[in-house]
Amino acid sequence: DVKVTQSSRYLVKRTGEKVFLECVQDMDHENMFWYRQDPGLGLRLIYFSYDVKMKEKGDIPEGYSVSREKKERFSLILESASTNQTSMYLCASSLPGPYEQYFGPGTRLTVT
Amino acid sequence: GENVEQHPSTLSVQEGDSAVIKCTYSDSASNYFPWYKQELGKRPQLIIDIRSNVGEKKDQRIAVTLNKTAKHFSLHITETQPEDSAVYFCAASINSGNQFYFGTGTSLTVIP
């Protein structure tokens, strides 16, 4: 069974803190994605990676960075968290090309 | 980049009636169109997808139609049931790329 897991379901951080969100997939997928989900705005792509150590900016990369040192793991980093980064963060993975993306359960991040 | 618009943002139907959600896209190079269902508190999951070499695809009570000329595609749910209540997202992707462009979502409520 396909599985994408995220390190936390809920996270509360203070403004200015460095935040790490981790995602792990067990499907040997080349592609991994980080999305942000906000009401009325749908799913917006922050970054994606198509191979180890490779990354591409999505639509809203400002304030975020990513790391992919191993194929199964993709990390999202908020260098200095701000209140406008309070959101639901979803990780996904897929085979190369336009194929089904499998999503993780999400991390609800609150920055106070 | 691609721009996907989705309507309506909310939809209420009586149990047993049909529901239709419509999406338009801007990039004629898009040729993969998935639909995701997200139940409250859960991860988005693929329910049906269509590629541009076909005009319609059905899976039991769910169907998707694609009009490449007009650049729009629609999700049709027949004989709706309370468990169809969820947020539905459309997306578009270009064959040569890996990125999905999501619509802003439709919150469907099926009234028993």
Image (cartoon, rainbow, N blue to C red):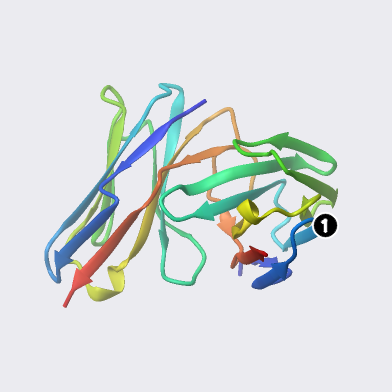
Residue A74 placement, left or right of B84? right
Relative image position of residue B75 (x, y in whole percent): 27, 49
Give the quarter of the image for residue A6: bottom right
The residue that label 1 is drawn on is: A18
Question: Is residue A93 in sight in this rendering?
Answer: no
Relative image position of residue B68 (x, y in whole percent): 31, 26
At x 61%, y 52%, the residue is: A84
| Quarter of the figure with the C terminus of chain B | bottom left
Residue B68 higher or lower than A47, as above or below:
above
Residue B102 higher or lower than B81, as above or below:
above
At x 73%, y 66%, the residue is: A13
Secondary element at tag 1: loop
Mark 1 belongs to which amino acid? Lys
Residue B33 higher or lower than A16, as above or below:
above
Relative image position of residue B97 (x, y in whole percent): 59, 31
Residue A25 placement, left or right of B8? right
